Image: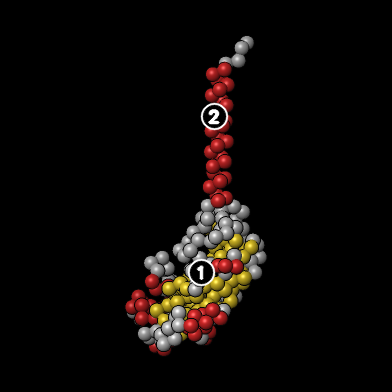
Amino acid sequence: MKPNLKNIAMKIIKYLVLVILFLLSVSHYSCKKAVWYGVVSTDTVRVYLPWSQGSNTIFSVMDSNYVKIDTVKKKITQYVTVPIPVLRGGFLTAQTFTVDVAVDNTKLQSLITSGVLPAATTVVLPPNYFIVAPKDTLTNQQEENRGTIKMQLKYASIKSLYAGQKIAVGIKISNPTKFLLNNNQSSCIVLIEVNKLVTKFGL
């Protein structure tokens, strides 16, 4: 019995189409970079802070429409939580892991000294006016490895002490327990204009 060449050709075409679709799918998930608000990492599989913007790594919180400040407990505790995103670029091998988190104001101080941030209106926020956990956990969320450093601000104290000024805190991540760190995007300066913060919440 002679083989049906037309049927064989159709099966080969279907097989090739499936192979091409599979390869395109793998290429999409392995090469696409993770993007949250902020800049995109230049390295697909490293851990980074998307708020690390430009050479000065300053992120102005109140000027961003993407930042959602948690106010659920604010009326009771007078805390405002600023969520600082942490990402691991790429979509493959999403795993749960941690990074160390620390306050590092070295660069912030130099920017104030050099005049990039005006000394008259920029305050390095003292550590007794905010809380940052020493570790953050990244998990698989929407096919991305992401975490959130929750910086809790003592809203009532900041409102009364720093009206008309901008408060700033330098945040740095290090030592991911899995994957590598993007050293070029491992720190950021969180800048918050107090008057805009008060206008937003009005308490």
Query: Which image quarter is the C terminus in?
Result: bottom left
Q: CA distance from mark 1 to mark 2?
A: 46 Å
Quadrant of residue 12 within the rendered picture: top right
Residue 11 position (above or below residue 158) = above
Dot 1 amino acid type: Ser
Q: Position of residue 161 (x, y in %)?
A: 41, 89
Dot 2 amino acid type: Lys
User: Mark 1 vs mark 2: which is more N-terminal?
Assistant: 2
Q: Position of residue 135 (x, y in %)?
A: 60, 72
Farthest-out residue, front: 114
Q: Position of residue 84 (x, y in %)?
A: 50, 70
Farthest-out residue, top: 1
Determine the secondary structure under disc 2.
helix
Residue located beneath label 2 in the image: 14
Residue located beneath label 1 in the image: 52
Quadrant of residue 185 within the rendered picture: bottom right
